[in-house]
Image (cartoon, rainbow, N blue to C red):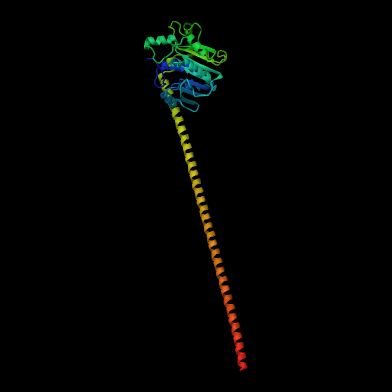
Amino acid sequence: MAVERIDPKNVHPLAWADHVHRYIWAKGFCQGVVLDVGCGVAYGSEVILESGRVATYLGVDVSEEAVRKARSDFGGVFVSIIQASCYGLPVSASSVDTIICFEMLEHLDCPGLAMAEFARVLSPSGIVLGSVPSREQEELVEQIYGRNRWHKERFNKAKLIKLVQSFFPHLQLYGQSLGVVDVIGLLPRSWPNAAVIDVNPGIPGPAPGPILFVAGQRHVDDDGNGPDVVRILPASSVYAPEREVAASEARAQALADQLAAEQAQRQALADQLAAEQAQRRALADQLAAEQAQRQALADQLAAEQAQRRALADQLAAEQAQRQALADQLAAEQAQRQALADQLAAFESELGAIVQAT
């Protein structure tokens, strides 16, 4: 059966060369923020980020499994992978500089809706890089494997031009063919016959392959960014299994190192967070202790004030008692004085009687 999703760890070298070749070609055009729609496992991110003009790579795929694998194998500082539909891209309008959509439009029921969404998110000076299987390629593959049940649309040159130019007036077409060499070159009007670059005279020409395109709201054929022809010669030796294994091991080691660094960073952040939480708890305990101390002092002050009021009341009572005793003593003294005066009067009267007798 035909290959629908490429996994660098499990693919024939020629099939891998055919697919990665498109990203090598696209790298010459890419710049700024790159949005790869239908990115699969995002193996193309490594090629695209080799360009010094690319700032970030954002991969979008509808498959949860592909997105999970992409994040595991190719996620990084400048790479983000999101699960989303091409009909509703989770990016702002006019925020993307380059859109890539390789071998994706033929899978859609409504490719026009996807192109409309591309037009929404692409900046006015941005470009769209895409590819679709040509009708000739589809027919050849169908003879070998049977009809591809995943492909909803078949594109010839005219149909692709009509679709793309409905949204992007400036368009440049390329053709790709895999044979002794894998070639991507500008597509003449007489394609497919004139699309073959004869690098080995006498050897049958390559079979028809996908149609690639560069499209935008501005001219895309005179800026000098993209290459006229990109070759992989020969595909089987460039992507030989031993080199592929070495590259996979190096990529796995790099990802492991990156994961270890991220885990160390997360651990450092976790330790910092734990230290901050411990510090906050210590400050909270200190604040609670200070509040308890203040409450104790307030209680002590209230007790002292109550004690002072009690002493004041006791003193007032003693003073009242002393005043009462003083008043009682004065009354007794007055009574004694009255008795003394009465006794003196009685003695005077008695003396007068005795003297009279």
| Residue 183 x, y percent position in the rendering | 47, 12
Of the 4 image quadrants, the one containing the C terminus is: bottom right
| Front in this rendered view, residue 340 or 157 | 340
Q: Is residue 169 depicted above or below 247 in this figure?
A: above
| Residue 114 x, y percent position in the rendering | 48, 18
> On the rendered structure, is 242 left or right of 54?
left
Q: Is residue 209 depicted above or below 69 in this figure?
A: above
| Front in this rendered view, residue 167 or 69 | 167
Q: Kindly identify the residue that appears in the image at 53 percent across and 62 percent down.
A: 310
Total residue callouts? 0
Q: Kindly identify the residue that appears in the image at 51 percent across and 48 percent down.
A: 287
| Residue 68 x, y percent position in the rendering | 42, 26
Instruction: State whether residue 228 appears in this view.
Output: no
Q: Quadrant of residue 301?
A: bottom right
Of the 4 image quadrants, the one containing the N terminus is: top left
Q: Is residue 207 depicted above or below 250 in this figure?
A: above
Q: Residue furthest bottom?
A: 357
Q: Kindly identify the residue that appears in the image at 54 percent across and 64 percent down.
A: 313
| Front in this rendered view, residue 146 or 242 | 146
Instruction: State whether residue 335 appears in this view.
Output: yes
| Residue 44 x, y percent position in the rendering | 47, 21
Q: Quadrant of residue 240?
A: top left
